Amino acid sequence: MNRLAFSGLLASLVIGDVACAHTPAATTTTANTTSEPPSAPHRRTPAEIIAVFAKKHPLSAPDEPLRHPKTLADVDAILHLDQIDLFQGAVDFASKQPGPDALALRAQIEIAHSEAQLVVAEVIAESADGLEVVTRTLRFRAESGKTSDEEKAKRAELEATFHEAREVAWALRELAAEHARNGATVAQMIMASKEKSYRGYRVAADYHRLRGDWDDFAEDINYLARENPTSNGLLFLKGIAAQAEGETDTAVKLFRNALQRDAKFVRAQAHIVLLQTNPEHAHTELAKLAELNPHHQLITYAGPFIEEAHKAWTSEHRNPSRWGQTTNL
């Protein structure tokens, strides 16, 4: 999936799925937004797949204080940490608080949850693609009768990792639909109100961006720029918009600018990881993310897959090709 497809997938989760501002939030994911996962004799649901995977790869400790936020400042801190195992507790707390800021934070968390799941799914899927290239060579060697026990074992290991990566990526994409719909529902409630706070305009900008309503998005950005031209959130939104339009270099530059202003802006670094197409570069940017939040889902969930893809890529590119030394014919 390319970057434009990533944006289009998230938009498809929003457009048409929310009938009105008062539609109850979905409790299950029913939309068929992505291709089917690899066939299996006893196929598990997306929730079951991720529950098992998350148990194997826990993010934060059970006694992490932010699992049970006590203030809206805690909810805002969770938003900046960009850690999906904390999002539901943040939504539950914000839902019980009065006022426009609480409502806006609730929408932001739901949308961030959906995007975070899609970012992880995308990175895992691309790592799987890298593994498939290597297993293809090992498969041909085995089928041609020239292989070793070591190669057979390595092929089995890589293929198992490849299939797990595909399944987890599919499940995350499916689960992202629920949070996108919930976020869209709350965003519509905010936009239908007569008064919007600064944070409310942030939510509106997210909503219009995800729907592809670029004229409305531009109006939201202009308002935010007038009210707070030095806002890091404004830089981040511009970076996300550039990413959605396929302007990778511009997006990365904006995200790096946001990180210069706030060295702990985890979400910005996470999107820089997403925008890497080279396993070596992805590996480098992932290490930077680990310094910001070692419990981030890209580290714990996608990290092992990226590591496998990086090792496989390094093995394939260890020596320069002899063909690169030939003269033009």
Image (spheres, rainbow, N blue to C red):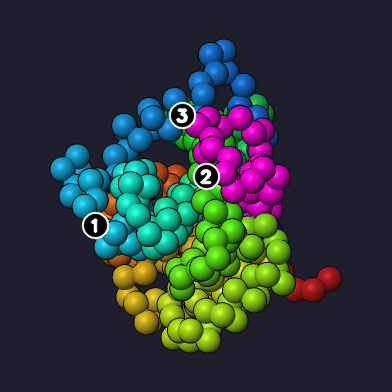
Label 2 to label 3: alpha-carbon separation: 17 Å
Work out whether residue 176 can be spotted. no
On the rendered image, what quadrant is the C terminus found in? bottom right
Q: To which residue does mark 1 refer? A: 71
Label located before the other in sequence (1 or 2): 1
Q: Is residue 251 left or right of residue 156?
A: right
CA neighbours of label 1 inside 10 A, class few (<14), some (14 to 19), many (20+): some
Closer to the camera in the image, 300 or 282: 300
Whether 17 is among the magenta residues is yes
Which residue is depicted at the point 43% across and 32% down? 50
Point out residue 188 in the picture as x, y percentages from the top left corner: 58, 54
Q: Amino acid at mark 1?
A: Thr
Mark 1 or 3, closer to the camera: 1
- Asked if residue 107 is positioned above or below residue 222 in the image, the reply reads above
Q: To which residue does mark 3 refer? A: 47
Q: To which residue does mark 2 refer? A: 182
Q: Which residues are magenta?
A: 5-33
Report the residue that reaches farthest toward the front. Answer: 194
Q: Is residue 144 left or right of residue 302?
A: right
